[in-house]
């Protein structure tokens, strides 16, 4: 952007979940990336993305998969929906507190890695913002790093925000 | 940041090298992260960091290291200094074109991973910005990803900017 040129409208994709790290990443993004102007009306759009886990399927010793009973699946689904609603409400409140930034929400079913990469591929946002969960060595080796996976697989810039140990919970 | 609150002064550490990817990351950062205001005088400070390679040391078959002659070392050092100057000049020009953002430069000797993590640890910037070189599978397996290593090892938020294949060289 040359001097004097105005910043364009941007779409900022923020992956949110029920962790403090993800809410910290959103607050950091609102404070540092979302454009500011004197009237506090941002031209940017923040797209909040939540990946809702699919109902669990367990694998038997012989390698065949089996699902839980429909009651348990329905209960899990209700619980997952409540978590999604709660996360989105908290994230939207945080955006409202910041300024008049436009907010869109998306809840998609699936593993966070796949959901984030698929949505980023489809929407082609200006930037993808993610929290870093700061997993330990063992947990990271087992689960892999969602932020690393996404940074490798999406085309847009990726901002990974690590929550400082000293910062107060949101 | 609550509505109406003014954005604070920030220190933005940008790792630069002689690649197009790193210059693209700097330009993206100037256009999207560095704060804007009507007078185009940013309150932020951009700290340009260049990691200058150390003179090469080769390892003999018996495991002992040996250096090149002092002439070759001096020639390599002169070349490395010229590259560092050229990268910094290009990066500073890019910052000047953007706005009145304050610019500091640092050239440190060593491997990019170590230099970036050490300087980020010492300066504790608000954000570290890096280009993604988009190495292929084999090169990444051999060299490792500088951006991934830094994202894992620094405490501040890390922004990794991938250069779109279609974008024009800087």
Image (cartoon, coloured by chain):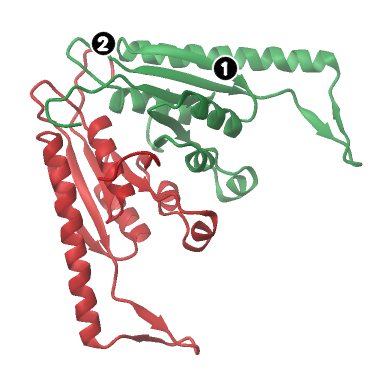
Chain colours: A red, B green
Rendered residue at 34%/39% (across/down): A167
**In the rendered image of this protein, does residue A143 appear above or below residue A13?**
below
User: Which residue sits furthest right?
Assistant: B62
Image quadrant occupied by the N terminus of chain A? top left
- In percent of width and height, residue B126 lies at 37, 28
Q: Considering only vertical position in the picture, is B76 above or below A129?
A: above
Chain letter of the residue carrying label 2: B
Q: Element at badge 2? A: loop
Residue A124 visible from this viewpoint: no
Give the image location of residue B15, x and y in percent.
49, 26
* Crowding near the residue tagged with mark 1, few <14, some 14–19, many ≥20 C-alpha atoms within 10 Å: some
Q: Position of residue B108 (x, y in %)?
A: 60, 20
Instruction: Tell me which chain the residue with mark 1 is part of.
Output: B
Q: Gap between marks 1 and 2, in whole Å? A: 26 Å
Q: Which residue is mark 2?
A: B41
**Residue to which mark 1 is pinned:** B107
Closer to the camera in the image, B144 or A71:
A71
Can residue A52 be seen here? yes
Q: Secondary structure at mark 1?
A: strand
Q: Is residue A24 above or below residue A42?
A: below
* Horizontal side of residue B87 vs B24, given as left or right: right
Query: Which label number is shown at residue B169?
Result: none
The structure residue drawn at horizontal position 49% and vertical position 60%, both measured from the top left corner, is A139
Left/right placement of residue B96 relative to residue B65 reads: left
**Quadrant (top left, top right, bottom left, bottom right) of the C terminus of chain A:** top left
First of labels 1, 2 by sequence position: 2
A113 horizontally vs B4: left or right: right
Asked if residue B169 lies left or right of residue A106, the reply is right
Residue B110 in the image, given as x and y percentages of width and height: 65, 26
């Amino acid at each position: 952007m040359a001097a004097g040129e105005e910043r364009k409208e941007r779409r900022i994709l923020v992956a949110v979940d029920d962790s403090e790290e993800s809410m910290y990443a959103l607050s950091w993004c609102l404070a540092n990336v979302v454009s500011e102007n004197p009237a506090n009306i941002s031209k940017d759009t923040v797209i909040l993305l939540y990946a809702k886990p699919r109902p669990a399927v367990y694998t038997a010793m012989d390698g065949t998969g089996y699902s839980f009973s429909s009651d348990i699946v329905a209960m899990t689904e209700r619980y997952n929906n409540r978590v999604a609603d709660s996360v989105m409400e908290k994230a939207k409140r945080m955006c409202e507190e910041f300024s008049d930034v436009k907010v869109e929400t998306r809840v998609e079913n699936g593993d966070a890695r796949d959901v984030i990469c698929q949505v980023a591929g489809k929407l082609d946002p200006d930037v993808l913002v993610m929290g870093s969960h700061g997993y330990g060595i063992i947990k990271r080796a087992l689960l892999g790093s969602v932020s690393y996976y996404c940074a490798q697989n999406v085309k847009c810039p990726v901002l990974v925000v690590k929550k400082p140990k000293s910062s107060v919970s949101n």
